Amino acid sequence: MVNQEYDTGKIKRLIIVLKRITLSVQIVPFVFTALYIIDFAAYSWLTESAQALCDTLFYISPLVIAAHLIYSKILHLCRWHRMACILPLFPQIVSFIDYYIIELSEIESLVTDSLTLVMTILLLISAYKVFFSNGRK
């Protein structure tokens, strides 16, 4: 009897831990991406030293993004959550194209503004789908 109560207590603690982990894994990509979008939007009017500081603080490595995607898959979170996880890759792809493929200097501000707008819209849609409509399609 005592052993069964102990097992029940352990199971309840594990369930609480799982709920907390799931909630944090669910929320963190949205917080990171929101900060990244704010940084990306403010980049055009920041000084060079402020830009360097923001790059250091808000850059999200593709490895971290991959980890978020893995956690999302393990916890069976929806595709909208995965969308929020991959949003920080968008500016990195543009930077990669600008640096290695074709220089975007003439249309850089248009691309940056458009990308910021698209990322913001996708983040808001993803947040709505994840937190208000339970990831329904």
Image: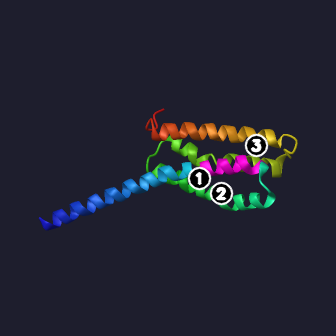
Q: Amino acid at mark 1?
A: Phe
Marks 1 and 2 close (CB-CB < 8 Å): yes
Please tell me the numbered disc located at residue 32: 1
Q: Amino acid at mark 3?
A: Thr
Mark 1 and mark 2 lie on one chain; the one further toward the N terminus is: 1
Of 100 and 30, nearer the camera is 30
* Crowd tier of the residue under label 3, counting other residues whose Cα lies within 10 Å: few below 14, some 14–19, many 20 or above: some
**Kind of element beneath mark 2:** helix
Q: Which residues are magenta?
A: 33-44
In the image, is 63 to the left or to the right of 44? left
Cα separation, mark 3 vs mark 2, equals 16 Å
In the image, is 48 to the left or to the right of 65? right
Mark 3 and mark 1 lie on one chain; the one further toward the N terminus is: 1
Of 57 and 98, nearer the camera is 57
Residue 107: x and y in percent read 84, 40
Q: How many marks?
A: 3
Please tell me the numbered disc located at residue 58: 2
| 25 lies above or below 122 | below
Q: Residue at x 83, y 47 (%)?
A: 101
Please tell me the numbered disc located at residue 112: 3
**Kind of element beneath mark 1:** helix
Q: Residue at x 22, y 60 (%)?
A: 8
**Kind of element beneath mark 3:** helix
